Amino acid sequence: MAQDRIATRRKKLISQLKAQHLDALLVTSVTNVRYLTGFTGDSSWLLIGPKLCVLISDGRYRTQIEEECPGLEAVIRAVDEKMSARAAAELASAKATRVGFEQDVLTIGLYDTISTASKTLELVPTQGAVEQLRQVKDSEEIAEIRIAIGLAERAFAAHRATLRPDLTEREIAHGLEHTIRGLGGVGAAFPPIVAVGDRAALPHYRAGALRVGQSGLLLVDWGAVSAGGYHSDLTRVIVTSKLSPKLEQVYGVVLKAQLAAIAEMGPGVSSRKVDSAARSVIESAGFGKYFSHGLGHGIGLEIHEAPRMSPQGETTLQPGMVITVEPGIYLPGVGGVRIEDDVLITRDGAEVLTSVPKSWESCRVDFV
Ligand code: GLY
Ligand code: MN
Ligand code: MN
């Protein structure tokens, strides 16, 4: 990965730390360490501040760090040395005393071991410092997300074209992941949700043993991880035989809600307002209580990341954010509909990056 991009991220973070009068930030989130160093392993901490930048790892990762992080200072702790003791020693030698930590990541156990290792440290809780930077993607990150979308879309097209009534939810989920890997992706972005019939009313259903032919309704929520570690996330409904007029009506409402939200998106718009654009369509149609989750979330190195679009969303959208838009209506015992696309905020609006057709007519699939 280009080191200058990573250096830019570190510079931005260091300005924030200075503003908070922190000598350093102890980064323990695996994803945040990756974002700030390019290192794709785990079990490693980054100490970063105006006067230090050091990755602490262990002997398993020596060569990988040399290869992935040229120019980065790395300390390989001894086998009998605790990570917390090494971190405390590095902070002491850099004369860093007021040190931030990631309050949503560091466990109480590790907090205690660091405090015990150094009596002079003032550990300051911080929240979302790196996550906030990660919200806005640079051009190479956007290119990676486009690759992740391409992988997911090609896999879906292949399985849609070869759908048989005897296939189980689990077989389709496995097939999607297998195809993504075969196309060069790291794998599925999460275990694909493949839900037959009334199971589609469970937003986070796990693919099971139901067969596609048992109902005319199939919901598929899937995504891919690109070789560079970026995620995509889509949902489509497949209709294999005539559905009740109620489900067709529900599909129309969800699609209308999704298009209303996308039309609202652009720089300077509040994430709450986008959520509300979709939610009000669903509420006006009388299904408000069946839309039981937020409208969407950022995607990037993780499948769910900032910003969140929900009634509590407090983010102002900015160019470079890539966010899912995924309204749904879930009718217990009947079925559910969710339509999910990935949207890039641009300088003058929004670009829908995903391209799987979603008109009602396009949902219809004949078995092979
Ligand atoms: N696949 C989970 C989600 O759409 O957020
Ligand atoms: Mn999804
Ligand atoms: Mn999603």
Image (cartoon, rainbow, N blue to C red):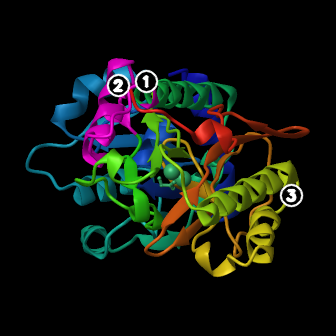
Residue 101 seen in the figure: yes
Label 1 near ligand 2 (CB < 8 Å): no
Q: Nearer the viewer, mark 2 or mark 1?
A: 1
Name the residue that disc number 2 marks. Answer: 179
Label number found at residue 158: 1
**Rendered residue at 60%/76% (across/down):** 290
Q: Which quadrant would residue 77 be assigned to in this image?
A: top left
**Rendered residue at 14%/51% (across/down):** 81
Q: Residues within 10 Å of mark 3 (few under 14, many from 20)?
A: some
Q: CA distance from mark 2 to mark 3?
A: 37 Å
Indicate whether 108 appears above or below 17: below
Label number found at residue 269: 3
Q: CA distance from mark 3 to mark 1?
A: 37 Å
Give SS at disc 1.
helix
- Residue 252 placement, left or right of 348: left
Q: Tags 2 and 1 in contact by the CB under 8 Å rule?
A: yes
Q: Tags 2 and 3 in contact by the CB under 8 Å rule?
A: no
